[in-house]
Image (spheres, rainbow, N blue to C red):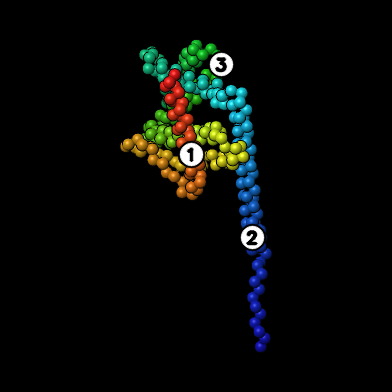
Amino acid sequence: MGKPRPQSSASSPSDDQSLVQALANILSKVVKRLDHQESVLNSIEKKMSSASTSGSSGESTKKPKVALLVRSEVRRMYKALCEDDEEFVAFNTDQGKDTENTKVVDRLVKEVQGSNPAFQSGLIRSACYTYYRTLCQEGSLKRRGKLDERNRTRRKRERLVRKLQDRISTMNKCSMNEKDKKRWATVLFQDFMSSEDSHTESGTLITRPIAWRSHKLDSFFKNLDAGTEKSRSEQSNLNFEH
């Protein structure tokens, strides 16, 4: 009686195809990630170069766009008319673009353009309808009891954006060499920032640190925040002396 043949350890063609497909998927994800990182680095380099160029010429890099100015003026004028003009009829957020709401827009266009002749009427009218849609959304959220939650989320996002802008500005002003600035700029994104929530009773901010963030990165952010506070303090003292 012959010896039993050992079972073959060779994988089947289907197993090989599955393995190849899995490796291909992993490789595809790696390539996409590298492409994204390269795109981010190029974007950072362009922004830093632009900031350096405009800073050397004495021009501000934060000039607000005309559209943002128009929207701000529309909101200000609408609130002023609601408070000061007894005959002014506010938007009816349940009716859509009906005749009465169109009259409100016409009045806003007239008032805003009267105080800001450089603003184009078409741009003002567009800003009016944008503000109207915002009021409709807020009314819907309020009726569903979700307006406060939306406002908290918005304030949280705005705090993160301001802090990120402050950190970028402080790093660009420090004496760090350009190579290190480019390296640290790769982590100056909201994904690397701790979340902050307002305590509902005391109103204080509760910071929730990111567990996976390194101590070195934590220290770097703390130094940037300290530099920002120092700059604000010095600016405040300068203004007080004047």
Q: Is residue 205 left or right of residue 58?
A: left
Please state the horizontal and vertical placement of residue 225, each as a whole percent of the image. 47, 36
* N-term mark: 2 or 3: 2
* N-term mark: 2 or 1: 2
* N-term mark: 3 or 1: 3
Residue nearer the viewer, 29 or 136: 29
Residue at the image point whose x is 42% and y is 22% from the top: 240
Residue at the image point whose x is 42% and y is 30% from the top: 138
Secondary structure of residue under mark 2? helix
Secondary structure of residue under mark 1? helix
Residue nearer the viewer, 106 or 18: 18
Q: Is residue 127 visible?
A: no
Query: Is 25 placed above or below 236 here?
Result: below
Query: Is 180 placed above or below 88 here?
Result: below
Please tell me how crowded label 3 is: few (under 14), some (14-19), or many (20+) other residues with Cα within 10 Å: some
Please state the horizontal and vertical placement of residue 29, each as a whole percent of the image. 62, 49
Residue sitting at the far bottom: 1
State which mark lies toward you, 3 or 1.
1
Please tell me how crowded label 1 is: few (under 14), some (14-19), or many (20+) other residues with Cα within 10 Å: some
Q: Is residue 46 visible?
A: yes
Amino acid type, label 1:
Asn
Question: Which residue has dot 2 on it?
Answer: 19
Image quadrant holding the N terminus, namely bottom right
Question: Which residue has dot 1 on it?
Answer: 223
Residue at the image point whose x is 49% and y is 37% from the top: 224
Secondary structure of residue under mark 3? loop
Image quadrant holding the C terminus, namely top left
Image disc number at residue 76: none
- Find residue 239 and report its image quarter: top left
Query: Is 159 placed above or below 118 here?
Result: below
Question: Which residue has dot 3 on it?
Answer: 120
Amino acid type, label 3:
Gln
